[in-house]
Image (spheres, grey):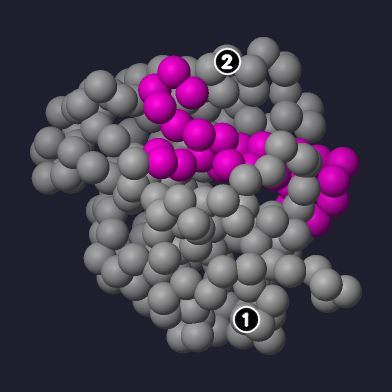
């Protein structure tokens, strides 16, 4: 179950980023693609690293970025996804995310040292944390990061340790304990590198409150 953005909600956007008007529908489970576009003001031709893919379009955090904003990047999944090459322009890496040399991979794929978006979402949550520890933050910078904590059922230490790692590497937690459609199930944290984000945009969205993704990015109907 997930909540979806569509053009009927465009006037509720807290920040109407460049190109918002051309979006008919988004594809993420919980507005992650819209968060990335919001933080980067609708950037065109951006880059991404998607760790944990599942499907090329369904509940995809990168399909909208690629399809309508010209982004490119790599998607990593332990399982082969036959339809990926028919539906996407970006490259699918069929590998165990915990067995990769990320410096070598990024160089082989000719990714820049400044990558716009990093998604970390594999199973179980312990593996997502282990993967985070493998990212070469000393050599590569990311504008926006979404990290799946699965806090609603996972060990609290995973959430706390991931937050410390990302803070120590210069990333600011913009939205913590992001939920999908119910506040009972916080599952993700959203980060940015302030060096690459317009401060006037960032200030609109900082929150220490658990909230649904829709409430983070849209104005409530009664406001």
- Percent x, y for residue 143? 37, 45
What residue sits 71% from the left and 61% below the top? 214
54 relative to 5, above or below: above
Q: Quadrant of residue 100?
A: top left
Specify whether residue 172 is painted magenta: yes
Seen from the viewer's position, the closer of residues 32 and 164 is 164
Extreme residue toward the front, this view:
200
Report whether residue 75 is seen: no
The residue identified by callout 2 is 161
Few, some or many C-alpha atoms within 10 Å of disc 2 (few <14, some 14-19, many ≥20)?
A: few
20 relative to 191, above or below: below
The residue identified by callout 1 is 10
Residue 222 is marked as: none
Give the residues in magenta.
167-194
81 relative to 186, above or below: below
- Percent x, y for residue 182? 84, 51
């Amino acid at each position: 179950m997930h909540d979806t953005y569509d053009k009927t909600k465009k006037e509720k956007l807290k920040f109407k980023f460049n190109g918002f008007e051309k979006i008919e529908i988004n594809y993420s489970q919980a507005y992650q693609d819209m968060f990335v576009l919001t933080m980067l003001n609708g950037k065109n031709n951006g880059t991404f690293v998607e760790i944990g893919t599942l499907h090329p379009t369904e509940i995809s955090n990168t399909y909208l970025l690629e399809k309508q904003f010209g982004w490119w990047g790599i998607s990593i999944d332990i399982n082969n996804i036959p339809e990926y090459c028919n539906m996407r322009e970006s490259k699918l890496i069929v590998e165990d995310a915990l067995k990769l040399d990320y410096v070598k991979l990024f160089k082989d794929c000719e990714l820049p040292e400044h990558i716009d978006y990093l998604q970390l979402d594999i199973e179980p949550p312990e593996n997502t944390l282990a993967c985070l520890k493998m990212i070469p933050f000393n050599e590569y910078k990311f504008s926006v990061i979404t990290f799946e904590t699965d806090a609603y059922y996972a060990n609290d230490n995973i959430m706390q340790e991931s937050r410390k790692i990302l803070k120590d590497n210069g990333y600011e937690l913009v939205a913590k304990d992001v939920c999908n459609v119910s506040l009972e199930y916080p599952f993700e944290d959203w980060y940015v590198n302030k060096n690459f984000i317009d401060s006037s945009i960032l200030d609109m969205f900082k929150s220490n409150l658990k909230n649904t993704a829709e409430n983070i990015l849209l104005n409530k109907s009664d406001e």
